[in-house]
Amino acid sequence: MGQDNLEKQRRYITSSYIFMFLALFTVVTAVLAYWLARKVSIANDVEVWMHAQALWVMRNAVIFLMLALFAALWFIPLIFFYWDSFIWVKACTVAGVVFSAIAWLFLLNAWLKGFTKYLQKKAVF
């Protein structure tokens, strides 16, 4: 019974890393990665390195969602004004693109670091 539970937890972590990678393309999968990692983090009989991996995914999913939300705020003037109407609309759009790139690169770096540690079966910090 205990071995089946560990295999189930490993599947959850693997699925959360898959969804974390897919979050590079759409934000909705970051929520799914968070939810699967949360299932592992609240379980009782989880190995320490898997618990650390779950917390890593949860932490980085939340940070990525906050960065993506902040980057999305910079695109709000595009709803009300045309791209070429004012220089400040262009500046806000460029800032939004820069912050979106920062959020994307943050998640890519976190995914690479976490997934390599996961394949080594080590805790990630």
Image (spheres, rainbow, N blue to C red):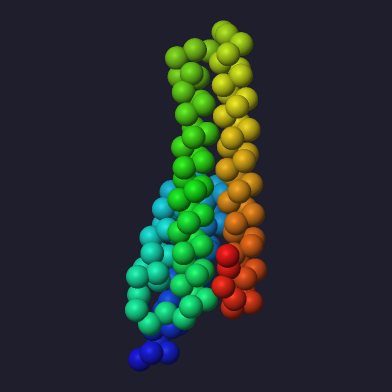
Pick the front one: 9 or 106: 106
Q: Residue at x 47, y 67 (%)?
A: 54
Q: Is residue 4 left or right of residue 17?
A: left
Which picture quadrant has residue 98? top right
Q: Is residue 84 visible?
A: no
Residue 63, position as x, y percentages in the image: 49, 48
Q: Residue at x 48, y 18 (%)?
A: 77
Residue 33, position as x, y percentages in the image: 45, 59
Q: Residue at x 60, y 27 (%)?
A: 95
Q: Is residue 117 left or right of residue 7?
A: right
Pick the front one: 43 or 19: 43
Q: Residue at x 56, y 57 (%)?
A: 21
Residue extending furthest toward the front = 125
Residue 40, position as x, y percentages in the image: 40, 71
Q: Is residue 14 left or right of residue 113?
A: left
Residue 61, position as x, y percentages in the image: 48, 53
